[in-house]
Image (cartoon, rainbow, N blue to C red):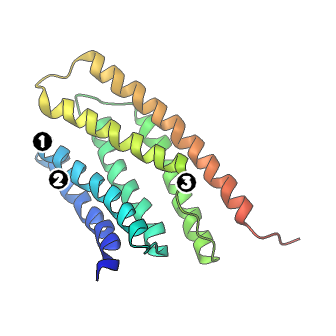
Amino acid sequence: MKHQIPNALTVLRFLLVPVFLYFMFISQQSWMALAIFIVASFTDYLDGMLARKLDVISDFGKIMDPLADKLLVLSALCGLCWLPPFNLSAIIFFIILVRELLITIMREVYQKRGIVVAADKLGKLKTVMQMLGIIVALSFWAAQDEVSVWVIKSVSIWFWIVAAITVISGFNYLRVLTKKEPDHA
């Protein structure tokens, strides 16, 4: 039973995404959105730590864990891009979305060929930076009636850096995949 805990935490993160979206977009309760995002982010850390500790790293976890992270992060980025006070550039969202879609599709294609590539350190850094930036932005949003211009600019700069790291980690993932691809010559 304890071997199923990491995968159950991944499933829980999937289930928290619509709840987060409700509080972010419909009821616009930034404190609740922040709390749910933090809980969901913590499940990401916890499921990875438990999977390693219990030595139950599975193909399901290798594929579904990053997918749950992507859905959570992209949901929050939607709010940061299209809702005040941040109204980040939609380009940031689309850079991250396109990279995540391409890598997710490629993961699926390669997994069907029996090639599974787990997230590397750069991919994990990207996820941590995305989640940290979202938590900081949501914290300012929840704590202040009016978010200052310098906070908005700082969050914007942070996410432009995150977008660049997202692209770099995508290219790194492609490099790793090409090394795992068997030669057909």
Q: Amino acid type of disc 2?
A: Tyr
Secondary structure state at the residue bearing disc 2: helix
Query: Vertically, is 108 above or below 41?
Result: below
Q: Position of residue 70 (x, y in %)?
A: 40, 54
Report the residue that reaches farthest toward the bottom: 1
Q: Which quadrant would the C terminus be assigned to in this image?
A: bottom right
Say which label, 3 or 1, has the lower sequence index.
1
* Residue 53 in which image quadrant: bottom left
Residue 31, numbered label: 1
Closer to viewer: mark 3 or mark 2: 3
Residue 120: image tag: 3
Q: Nearer the viewer, mark 2 or mark 1?
A: 1
Residue tagged by mark 2?
22
Callout 3 environment at 10 Å: few (<14), some (14 to 19), or many (20+)? few
Q: For residue 65, which quarter of the picture?
A: bottom left
- Asked whether 50 or 37 is in front, the reply is 50
Q: Choose the circle earlier in sequence order: 2 or 1.
A: 2
Q: Position of residue 108 (x, y in %)?
A: 55, 69
**Closer to the observer: label 3 or label 1?**
3
Please tell me which of labels 3 and 2 falls first in the chain. 2
Three-letter code, disc 1: Trp
Query: Real-space Cα distance between discs 2 and 1?
Result: 12 Å
34 left or right of 14? left
Query: Element type at marker 1?
Result: helix
Decide: is 81 above or below 19. Answer: above
Kindly identify the amino acid type of the residue bearing the numbered disc 3.
Asp
